Image (cartoon, helix red, strand yellow):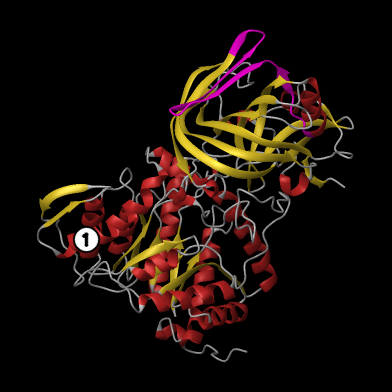
Amino acid sequence: MEFGVFFELSVPRPFTRESESAAYFDALAQATLADELGFDNAWVVEHHFLEEYSHSSAPELFLTALAMQTERIGLCHGAVVCVPGVNHPVRIAERAAALDILSRGRLQLGTARSSTWTELGGFCNEPDITKVSWDEYVQAIPRMWTQDSFSFDGVSFRMPARNVIPKPVQKPHPPMWVAVTSPGTELEAAKRGLGCLGVSAQSFAAQERTVEKYREVIANCDPVGEVVTDKVHSMNYLFCHEDIGYASKVGRNFINRFSFLNTNQLWSREVFPSSAYRSLGNLAPGKSPGRSDPARSRPEDDPAKVKPLPEGVTIGDPEHIIAAIRKWESAGVDGINFLLSCVDAIPHEEVLESLRLFAKEVMPAFGKGRDDLKVGVKLEVA
Amino acid sequence: MLRGNRSIDEVFNGAPDVDVENLEPLELGRLSWLQLNYELLVGDGYRTDFFPPGLHPTDPVVVNLQVWDVDDGPAGPFRLAQVRLTCRAGVRIRALQTNSVIDGTDEARRRLSSGWAYRPVAGSIDFKRFNNRWSAEVAVDGRPVLKGHMSLPQPLNAADLQHIANMNAGMVDGEALLLQVEPAITTLGVLRGAPVLENFDPEFWNLGDAKPGFPVIGAGADLTMTLPPVRFMQDPVKSAIHGTRKVA
């Protein structure tokens, strides 16, 4: 089981230059501590224009800073938006390779296509193109990393033969992932030999089905690159505290803040009809179970209803968190990436304490963490 | 999460009296439906200025310019034009109606108003479907308030179109409430094309100095629609979580 930390770089209103800076430097401190404590990965998202929810529009810069002050944690760039108006694929390959060099081979590249009109519209991208462009990008980037002469004649971009430089340190190239928000995307990842980076809450049963289908398909994949990343990671919320009552209270506020901020944005599907976005994005508002044909049905749509807490939330005391992770492990998940806070739901110092307690009490139960932190820790857990 | 800051008096200015208790469904049958979407270009204000505190503006707010062409039904044939602004009630997508125009029978106007808090002003609505465009022109007392079309429509799958429920301001037993109006829709066919706006009167549509700005997309559909009884109403000053009531 791999453990990662996951950063949206959310910023509370009212925005000030100072509060944005604080969000960046707090996250850097948290990621640096995560490195020291033995976490495996630090994921940093790419979003644009998503006020409050995510001010992480240049994750490669954040990761470069993190690379300079850490030694072993995986630097996970993503998911990078693979859409022409947002990123040219050459620039993605170049930046990622440079980051791999500067981090001495710690880069992993996540890919995505964005699901909000807030972002796609902001770059004047028509939603229709995103599935095609994502496919072309994920096939092109590994070739840019490994070939001395690369050319491409596709729908979303074309270019004459050039040597895309620098090349990454990792040979043949860094691992690649796909951010999975909609059911079925995990199969698209598997078909291409890409890691499945879950970024939405799923039930245990749904996660088990996702893993099972993913494993079936990736066993016979047609890899886009020279590396197959056969891994399924899920996302979770982390707040680890000795007092489970306090943890639950703080954690509930944390999850609510995240869920509400996530809906400030406008999903592409809501204003731009397109077959590219039939299924809504992560934690989609208004989505009702069993609503197979939204054009026909009149679902239960009570706006006062609050989503119940997802199964297996890793908020609580260490014992509770260990039990939750065991269930995710039994569902076949290879790793969990933890969101540590949202805006100011959990003060920075408490986030650091939560990470320390997790490393001390939870990681050893999974054979993880630094050896010096394992001394004297009870490993027996009911 | 941002909340609206428009005064309740402004939002409910002219809101109709509504009787939601004894409401029968209104089956509109088959109709043509046109929607031109634009991002709201806010003037000197901010996007919160258009919503009561109980609603949250989306980012960006999109203006839905919508026209229905109803062939027949219990209230007779009519055309309705409405302007709506996208927002959220709680986390759910909704569209707040800012004004509407009806071209049809008094009975249609009365039922839409007293049952679902549409407050259509009587006017003329010209609606035409051609192979290369679907066009609509709306006027009130001879004054043009909306003229636009969807250009070069191309077919999509019916499931590609998501319909968004209205939030309509109505007076229920003298109390100002937002009615969640959720037409039951079966989409039979959908076309999509570029929106083209030739004329728009922001003052008539209660948008102040704001107006449709960056074009998003146009969509046209053949569909069947029924307006079922209202299920949920919201106190306009409270969040949906705390201010939603179920209609008995």
State the image coordinates of residue A48 (x, y, percent, origin top left).
41, 45
In the rendered view, tell whether residue B236 sits above or below residue A198. above
Circle 1 Cα neighbour tier, 10 Å, few/some/many (<14 / 14–19 / ≥20): many
- The boundaries of the magenta stretch are B116-144
Instruction: Decide if residue A373 is on the left or right side of residue B117.
Output: left
Q: Is residue B58 left or right of residue A212?
A: right
Direction top: furthest residue = B142
Q: Is residue B247 above or below residue A70?
A: above
Magenta run includes residue A300: no
For the N terminus of chain B, give its image quadrant.
top right
- Compare residues A53 and A204 and report the one nearer the observer: A204
Q: Tell me the SS state at disc 1.
A: helix
Is residue B92 depicted above or below A330 in this figure?
above
Main secondary structure of the magenta stretch: strand
Residue A138 x/y as whole percent: 29, 60
Res A170 visible: yes
Query: Residue, x 64% and y 21% (percent of image)?
Result: B206
Report in which chain the residue with disc 1 lies. A
Q: Which residue is mark 1?
A: A97
Q: Nearer the viewer, residue B223 or B111?
A: B223
Residue A8: give x, y in percent of width and height. 46, 55
How many numbered circles are shown? 1
In this view, A292 is above or below B143: below
- Amino acid at circle 1: Ala
Residue B4 visible in this rendered orientation of the protein: no
Q: Farthest residue in the bottom direction?
A: A380
Report the side of B47 relative to A190 (left or right): right
Residue drawn at x 24%, y 69% is A105
Return the x and y of residue A207 as percentages of the image width and height. Answer: 53, 73
